[in-house]
């Protein structure tokens, strides 16, 4: 097990040493040196070529980040504004409902008054009431129906 692995490992090391000796003997060091130098030149050219696009990308990313922050702040503001508008609309709706209920109550009161005025035998009694007294009575009845809410 372990001895066999050691022998195999030693064999691999020997092969690598022979390859290195062969490269050195064939002038491979010079070839490797030139190859490394060419790779260095290519790397520097590539780095110079990519420097501007990388900087432009970083600048765009920063601008996008700032724009995103501004839009998020606007969104928060608009959400708050929308909430306030919804509250106002709800209050207006409630007020409108109260006004409609008041109009209905006044209409019912008028209907009741008209029905009372249409009863037989009321014509003689009605003729003795002056228009001022009639308005005063209607005002008292309307105040009773509305609970006095019709006063400013």
Image (cartoon, rainbow, N blue to C red):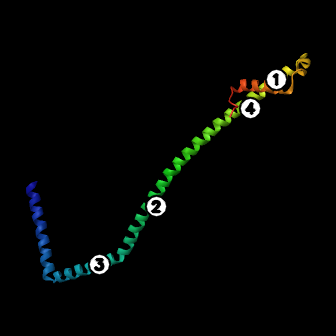
**Quadrant into which the N terminus falls:** bottom left
Q: In which quarter of the image is the C terminus?
A: top right
- As drawn, the label of residue 124 is none
Q: In this view, does 142 lie to the left or right of 90?
A: right
Front tag of 1 and 2: 1
Q: Name the residue under label 3.
A: 44
Q: Tag 2's secondary structure?
A: helix
Label 1 to label 2: alpha-carbon separation: 68 Å
Say if 123 sits above or below 21 in the image: above
**Mark with earlier residue (4, 3):** 3
**What is the C-alpha distance between the residues marked 4 and 1?**
15 Å
Q: Estimate the x, y position of residue 113 in percent, counting from the top left.
A: 82, 23
Structural distance between the alpha carbons of marks 2 and 4: 53 Å
Above-or-below relation of 39 to 130: below
- Of the numbered discs 1 and 2, the one sitting upstream in the chain is 2
Q: What element carries label 4?
A: helix
> Residue at the spot x=59%, y=42% of the render?
88
> To which residue does mark 1 refer?
113
Spatial distance from mark 4 to mark 3, Cα to Cα? 87 Å
* Quarter residue 8 falls in: bottom left
Location of mark 4 (residue): 103
Position of residue 109 measured from the top left corner of the image (x, y, whole percent): 77, 25
Q: Please report whichever mark, 4 or 1, sits nearer to the chain's N-terminal start.
A: 4
Other residues around mark 4 within 10 Å, as few (<14) / some (14–19) / many (≥20): few
Q: Name the residue under label 2.
A: 67
The relative height of residue 140 versus residue 58 in the rendered view (above or below) is above
**Front of the two marks 4 and 1:** 1
Are the residues at dot 4 and dot 1 in contact (C-beta closer than 8 Å)?
no
Q: Is mark 1 on a helix, strand or loop?
A: helix
Q: Indicate left or right for 40 with 27 as reference.
A: right
């Amino acid at each position: 097990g372990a001895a066999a692995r050691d022998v195999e490992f030693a064999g691999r090391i020997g092969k690598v040493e022979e390859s290195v000796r062969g490269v050195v003997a064939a002038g491979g060091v010079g070839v490797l040196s030139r190859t490394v130098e060419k790779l260095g030149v290519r790397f520097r050219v590539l780095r110079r070529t990519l420097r501007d696009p990388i900087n432009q990308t970083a600048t765009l990313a920063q601008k996008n980040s700032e724009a995103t922050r501004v839009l998020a702040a606007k969104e928060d503001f608009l959400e708050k504004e929308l909430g306030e508008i919804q509250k106002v609309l709800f209050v207006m709706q409630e007020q409108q409902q109260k006004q409609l209920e008041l109009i209905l109550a006044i209409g019912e009161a008028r209907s009741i008054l008209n029905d009372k005025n249409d009863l037989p035998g009321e014509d003689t009694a009605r003729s003795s009431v002056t228009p001022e007294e009639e308005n005063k009575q209607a005002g008292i009845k309307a105040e009773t129906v509305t609970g006095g809410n019709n006063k400013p």
